[in-house]
């Protein structure tokens, strides 16, 4: 007897080829990985180069990592370059690139003015293909970590946000978050019906090697949504080491593409019809009985 055919439902897909041709109903999205330093102009030039690579590969939505414009020598360096919403070279860069390439562009995080003179709002800014600001999310959960000599305390220089933010785009509804937010699943439940979860990050190597992939895939699986996670990845002039491993994960938890270390671009395809079929086959989101968000 010939063996019974196995279902392909939910099976891992082959690694996305960088030269993959457009497919009907599939929108190409990209995550940019960087190892930013203290020089804003240099970081923006590197971001420009990587955005152009993503555009050449057909991306309609491109996301930059947290702190893409500056990883200062000191935490307070970002306070010195903070911008008012709608003004400043970092936002002008994002608007110009989005309009020039006719893409939706996610500025992983931009230091914006806060109500406290010595702090910033760490803000994820989404620009549409006309170069207009479509959404702003201020990071809610602030990273604090202490293990031996390695210590971080974002609350010293960042004022937390309060609002959950989603925005409709041509490739689907986007849910916004930043880095440490990833550890708080209640935030993603509060996003409700989103197609793509954004997680621009700068995970430390210590926490990233332990938890990054597990958390990214968990957020995709439990919310039956794509996750687009651009990250800082490498050694920085300030002595910090970030984990990298930027990735795109589909709603079944399959990693479509990833980049372990260094600067580069990862690509993936968003298929909203596939997403709908998965949610119909496994309607876990409608089976919830505890509603706290």
Image (cartoon, grey):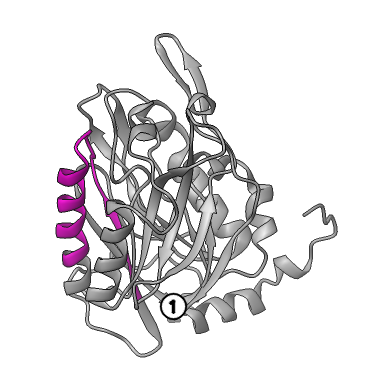
> At 63% from the left edge and 55% from the top edge, which residue is drawn?
188
Q: Is residue 90 left or right of residue 218?
A: left
Asked whether 283 or 259 is in front, the reply is: 259
Asked whether 34 or 153 is in front, the reply is: 153
User: Does dot 1 land on a helix, a strand or a loop?
Assistant: loop
Quadrant of res 150: top left
> At 24% from the left edge and 39% from the top edge, which residue is drawn?
36
> At 55% from the left edge and 51% from the top edge, which residue is drawn?
218
Q: Relative to 142, say whether 268 is above or below.
A: below
Outermost residue, bottom side: 24
> At 39% from the left edge and 46% from the top edge, which residue is drawn?
83
| Residue 152 percent across, percent down from the top left | 45, 22
Mark 1, residue position:
171
Quadrant of res 256: bottom left
Q: Relative to 131, say whether 33 is above or below.
A: above
Asked whether 230 or 137 is in front, the reply is: 137
Outermost residue, right side: 289
Quadrant holding the N terminus: bottom left
In the rendered image, residue 99 lying in the magenta stretch gets the answer no
Q: Is residue 135 left or right of residue 268?
A: right
| Residue 221 percent across, percent down from the top left | 57, 58
Q: Relative to 115, say whether 126 is above or below.
A: below
Neighbourhood count class around disc 1 (C-alpha, 10 Å): few under 14, some 14–19, many 20 upward: many
Q: Which residues are magenta?
A: 28-52
| Residue 24 percent across, percent down from the top left | 35, 90
Quadrant of res 209: top left
| Residue 154 percent across, percent down from the top left | 49, 28
In the rendered image, residue 33 lying in the magenta stretch gets the answer yes
Badge count: 1
Quadrant holding the C terminus: bottom right
Q: Relative to 107, say whether 274 is above or below.
A: below
Q: Is residue 161 left or right of residue 78?
A: right
């Amino acid at each position: 007897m010939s063996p019974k055919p196995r279902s392909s439902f939910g099976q891992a897909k082959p690694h996305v080829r960088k030269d993959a041709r457009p497919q009907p109903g599939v929108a190409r999205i990209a995550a940019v990985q960087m190892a930013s330093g203290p020089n804003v102009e240099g970081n923006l030039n590197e971001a420009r180069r990587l955005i152009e690579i993503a555009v050449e590969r057909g991306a309609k939505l491109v996301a930059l990592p947290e702190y893409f414009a500056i990883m200062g020598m000191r935490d307070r360096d970002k306070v010195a370059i903070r911008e008012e919403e709608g003004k400043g070279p970092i936002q002008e860069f994002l608007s110009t690139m989005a309009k020039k390439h006719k893409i939706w562009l996610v500025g992983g995080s931009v230091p914006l003015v806060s109500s406290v003179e010595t702090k910033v709002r760490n803000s994820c800014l989404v620009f549409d293909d006309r170069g207009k600001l479509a959404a702003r999310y201020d990071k809610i959960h602030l990273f604090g970590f202490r293990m031996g000599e390695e210590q971080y305390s974002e609350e010293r220089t960042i004022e937390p946000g309060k609002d959950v933010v989603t925005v409709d785009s041509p490739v689907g509804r986007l849910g916004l978050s930043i880095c440490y937010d990833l550890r708080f699943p209640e935030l993603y439940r509060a996003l409700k019906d989103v197609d793509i979860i954004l997680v621009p990050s700068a995970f430390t190597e210590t926490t990233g090697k332990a938890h990054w992939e597990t958390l990214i895939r968990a957020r995709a699986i439990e919310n039956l949504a794509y996750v687009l996670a651009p990250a800082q990845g490498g050694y920085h002039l300030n002595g910090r080491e970030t984990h990298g491993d930027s990735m795109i994960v589909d709603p079944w938890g399959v990693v479509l593409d990833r980049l372990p270390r260094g600067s580069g671009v990862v690509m993936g395809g968003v298929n909203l019809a596939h997403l709908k079929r998965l949610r119909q086959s496994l309607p876990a989101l409608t089976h919830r009985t505890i509603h706290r968000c």
